[in-house]
Image (cartoon, rainbow, N blue to C red):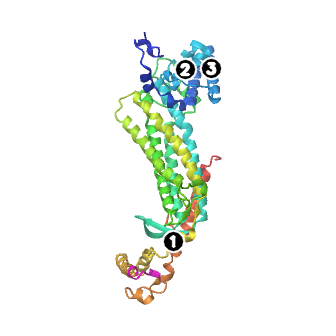
Amino acid sequence: MGNKKPWGGRFSKQSAAWIDSFGASISFDQEMAHEDLEGSLAHAQMLKKTGIISPADAEQIIAGLKEIEHDLKAGKVTFDVQLEDIHMNIETLLTQKIGPVAGKLHTARSRNDQVATDLHLYLKHRLPEINAALLELQEVLVQKAQQHVTTIMPGYTHLQHAQPISYAHYLLAYYQMFSRDRERFEFNLQHTDINPLGAAALAGTTFPIERAYTSKLLGFSKTYSNSLDAVSDRDFVLEFLNNASILMVHLSRFCEEIILWCSYEFGYLELDDSFSTGSSIMPQKKNPDMAELIRGKSGRIFGHLLGLLTTMKGLPLAYNKDLQEDKEGVFDTVKTIIPTLKIFTGMLKTLKVNAAKMEQATTHDLSNATEFADYLASKGLPFREAHRVVGELVLKCIAEKRNLQDLTPAEMQAVSPLIANDIYAKLTSKEAVARRNSFGGTGFSQIKKQLAQARAELASNSPKN
């Protein structure tokens, strides 16, 4: 008894059901059902235009594919694991609708270029959605920053108080990170927007196909110029998973700070109730679970990237069954980062800022020591010497549980006669922030410039433009 698979003519045995199940991909590649139909419709139109199949056969195939698309949208389609993948399932459904003429659809095409086309289309359709979600997040960041230009908070290095900064400056740092994320996804689209259809199995085809025509029908800006590369390339997928991983790093870092700053010890922020949860045993608890989940989901995205890199590293050209492993990570990543961005945006938008607590944290932490050293340097003292002098005053303050601004003029002048009464105005945290007006600094005038630039960038990237 021979093999009944569509490709089974040269096989003398039928594989066991459990083996078929192991090799099948329909459980996950049905995610690309619409893309598979889209590619098949373009291929059928090309076969008609070039006369590779008759107009009557082509029209019958096109009508049948459109019926399947309608059934799919209506939820009337079921897939069969025995048919292995989305391609054979669609072809079988088409055969059930229009008969043996459905077999002509696969003329001048292989599942190798078909699956590559489906995956290109899948990401091509979703990358703009990801960037739209990023733009929405950036808009909320800018809105929040505009409200907090003069809100003072501790700036940290090594998670220790370093120098006071504006909370808006902090928010705009993440705005810049997300801008780079958008740029990476936009560049990713360049390598996704290439058509592999027509490369066939690996060597092209003897039929007089018009690949530029299918590229036009499918909205691809370019066509792969090498058939081996077309069916084996997954760089665009690796780029996507890499870009998603970097995005999740940024979101995870942001969430880590939100989690810390919502704690009793910090008290800088409070999450809205709608983005928090309670405890099953402790009635007082308000947990930052959404932030923690986002932080945690970064690991699964990193895993998808590492998994595909490992799969790809030893593959000879051209197509290998290993490439079946390229899809689940992509689908899961898309399903993870889009809702993650939406959750994070809502969480940030409703976040309450305890501005008084933030500023208070900068008044007793000696984080104005750099201002003091800069003051002495501006008076002509070499900065290294100024650093030593202020360090001695810091040591005195620590020993006596005082602040630099609490020292008397005489105590200050005992370490340096350059110190005058004008030092006190420069030691306030607000003044320390306001004076840092070097390009890109935390000074209020610089923040306003950053905000103006951000608003212009968002306006230029708006879907209306």
Judge whether residue 117 can be spotted in this image. no
- Amino acid type at image mark 3: Gly
> Tag 2, which secondary structure?
helix
Q: Which mark is residue 91?
A: 2
Q: Position of residue 377 (x, y in %)?
A: 40, 78
Do labels 1 and 2 touch, CB within 8 Å?
no
**Disc 3 on helix, strand or loop?**
helix
**Label 1 near label 3: C-beta < 8 Å?**
no
Query: Which residue bears the numbered disc 1?
Result: 433
Q: Position of residue 160 (x, y in %)?
A: 42, 67
The circle on residue 64 is 3
Judged from the image, the secondary structure of the residue bearing numbered disc 1 is helix
Tell me what residue is drawn at x 61 percent, y 28 percent. Answer: 72
Q: Residue furthest bottom?
A: 410
Q: Give the crowd class for mark 1: few <14, some 14-19, many >=20 residues within 10 Å.
A: many
93 in magenta: no
Instruction: Give, as a three-letter code, the residue at label 2.
Output: Glu
Range of residues picked out in magenta: 397-405
Q: Where 30 sits versus 130, above or below?
A: above
The location of residue 390, given as percent across then percent down, is 39, 79
N-terminal-most mark, 3 or 2: 3
Mark in the foreground, 3 or 1: 3
Residue type of the residue flagged with mark 1: Val
Decide whether the magenta segment is chiefly helix, strand or loop.
helix
Task: Give me the C-alpha separation between circle 1 and circle 2.
Answer: 66 Å
Q: Residue furthest top?
A: 1
Q: Is residue 141 above or below residue 375?
A: above
**Spatial separation of the CA atoms under disc 3 and disc 2:** 10 Å
Q: Quadrant of residue 69?
A: top right
Q: Identify whether 20 is placed above or below 441.
A: above
